[in-house]
Image (tube, rainbow, N blue to C red):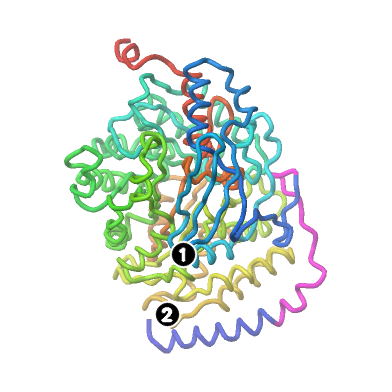
Amino acid sequence: MAKPIKYAEKGLSAVANVAFNSIQFFNQYKPNPSFTPKWSEKPLLKSWQKTKPTLGWPRTTDSLCPKCVKEARTRIIENGEDPWQVIEERPGEIKATIIERNGEIWMIKDCPVHGHVEDMMAMDAKFLEHIEAMYPGRDIDAHNDKTLHKHGSSTIKHGRGSVLTVDLTNRCNMMCDPCFMDANQVGFVHELSWEDIQEIMDNAVSIKPRRQMSIQFSGGEPTLSPYFLDAVRYSRKVGYNSVQAASNGIEFAKSKEFCRKAAEAGLRYVYLQFDGIGNAANSHRQVGNLFDVKLKAIDNLHEAGVEIVLVTTLVNTVNNDEVGPVIRFALDNPKKIGFISFQPVSFTGRDEDITDDRRLRQRYTLSHMAHDVKKHIGITDPHKDWFPISLMSAFADFADMAHGPEREWGQMSCGCHPNCGVGTAVIIDKETKEMAPIPDFINIPGLVKDMQAVTDAARNKKFSMFMMALALLKNYNSLKSPTHFKLTDLMKKFDKTFGLSGKNYGKTDPTRTIEDIELRRKDRWNFLFIAGMWFQDLFNYDFRRTEMCIIPYGTQEGEISFCAYNTGIGWRNIIEHMHQNATVAKWYKD
């Protein structure tokens, strides 16, 4: 785009700055009260009404002794004690202190029986300080949830969550290390029946606030379940717009027809295990041509209309050098890849008995990741260009207010603890592959602050959208945006995400067709979100994070925090033993 237009847009931003500040001076007085929407039995929260956990350091929290927890599991699984009774005893719960030491953040704790445990939370205290400072607060507390949230100290207490994970089976066609669930090694098969799947989905819509969530089918390998396609189809029928599968991609690589059927059933995203570029970078998965398999899966899924999220588990000294190559792969394939989810290793499942020396050597934190992005790609400042995932809830709050009280579903809202996940974003021109980090040309902290002010005032939809447009203009620097990126592109991106104007960019609801998918893909600009999601293990477990979980597991015993399920007291082990189908030998014999 010609420079004069860029300068004209810069001038519009200056005008918008004056206009917004002048109008907001009066708009801040006598805000309208928050309404109670259909999807909640409690009113929307103003920004100042949102609660926060204790942040900063030093601070004290509640944690677990790794050895005490494993002893409690043995009592339940091997000795046959009543799991609910053992849970009520709160086994292994101890205090922990989070401190700064030599510019790093550490969790330290002492068990009166098993002694001292410590682990790194961040290799850069300033990074975590910035992330915690940007935390906007918790969502509306969960309600109508007592029959599903009933798991002792690990019970989810705040918000509805963003991704409901449902493990369809513990069977897998690989043997990975690390593996959250120790797939193929527990000696029995745990696989949900069709009735189980329906009940979990039906229960999910009973919890208030009833927000849109992503439903992610996982495992094991979810595509091995005989009910995989039916489960995808049913979740759309229940009313969820975003249906995902967390997969190694093998079944999708094998068959274009299977990809087509999955897309027709309503599969929108595949969270594709993706540890690096080239077969050598994936060799620890014990499949010689695994990277070639990933490429085939990506091509087949894209052709079928399914979007791909690259999911990379990062282990220090193993594949942390793949951060840059994975991002470059996404930048080189902007028509196919729109999301990267880096997951610093959690020493659970197959790795729970790791030695202290190996654990400290291989520990990789969100701060490591942010610094590696800067080191490998040369973009984003770890101290200002990364934000807690939960900052996105400020955008959801605005959309909820603007959509009004009659809407059947609330906006997806990420309200997790700031220590759980971080993100940044890059805009890419699909035609030229020119890219620019979003924080370079949008003042994210300023935009969020202005948006919260508009949301808190709670005026009518048209006025609120006008003020939101001014806020976008005010915080936009056209001189640092990509060459062909226009102000109208920015407005369209925002509207496309939150559906405020009613314009048809291609539907995402359960009536979505392949034509809708192609229409949404016509957008010249790819918004590449780079996220880091750090799941807990017994060595860094923090109950303040667990009770704010946004990724609950839907199980035969209710909805359980991701970290409490895969680690913590060990709800996965307990529930899978309670509801196992058969031993592995009997399963395959029959």
Q: Disc 1 marks which amino acid?
A: Asn
Residue positioned 43% across, 60% down in the render: 123
Tell me, yes or no, whether the two marked residues, 2 and 1, touch with CB atoms within 8 Å. no
Relative vertical location of residue 528 with respect to residue 539 in this rendering, above or below: below
Question: Which residue corresponds to mark 1?
Answer: 102
**In this image, 29 relative to 308: left or right?**
right
**In this image, 132 relative to 226: left or right?**
right
- Locate the N terminus and report the quarter of the image it occupies: bottom left
* Magenta residue check for 35: yes
Residue 194 seen in the current view = yes
Residue 241 seen in the current view = no
| Image x and y of residue 38, in percent | 71, 45
State the SS at label 1: loop
Relative vertical location of residue 9 with respect to residue 360 in this rendering, above or below: below
| Image x and y of residue 449, in percent | 63, 70
Gap between marks 2 and 1, in whole Å?
36 Å
**In this image, 141 relative to 270: left or right?**
right
Mark 1 Cα shell of 10 Å, populated few (<14), some (14-19), many (≥20): few
Relative vertical location of residue 254 with respect to residue 461 in this rendering, above or below: above
Q: Earlier in the sequence, mark 2 or mark 1?
A: 1
- Locate the C terminus and report the quarter of the image it occupies: top left
Residue positioned 34% across, 11% down in the render: 586
**In this image, 575 relative to 372: left or right?**
right
| Image x and y of residue 344, in percent | 40, 50
Question: Which residue corresponds to mark 2?
Answer: 480
Mark 2 Cα shell of 10 Å, populated few (<14), some (14-19), many (≥20): some
Task: Point out the stretch of residues depicted in magenta.
Answer: 22-41
* Magenta residue check for 557: no
| Image x and y of residue 564, in percent | 53, 37
Between 175 and 409, the residue placed more toward the observer is 175
State the SS at label 2: helix
Q: Disc 2 marks which amino acid?
A: Lys
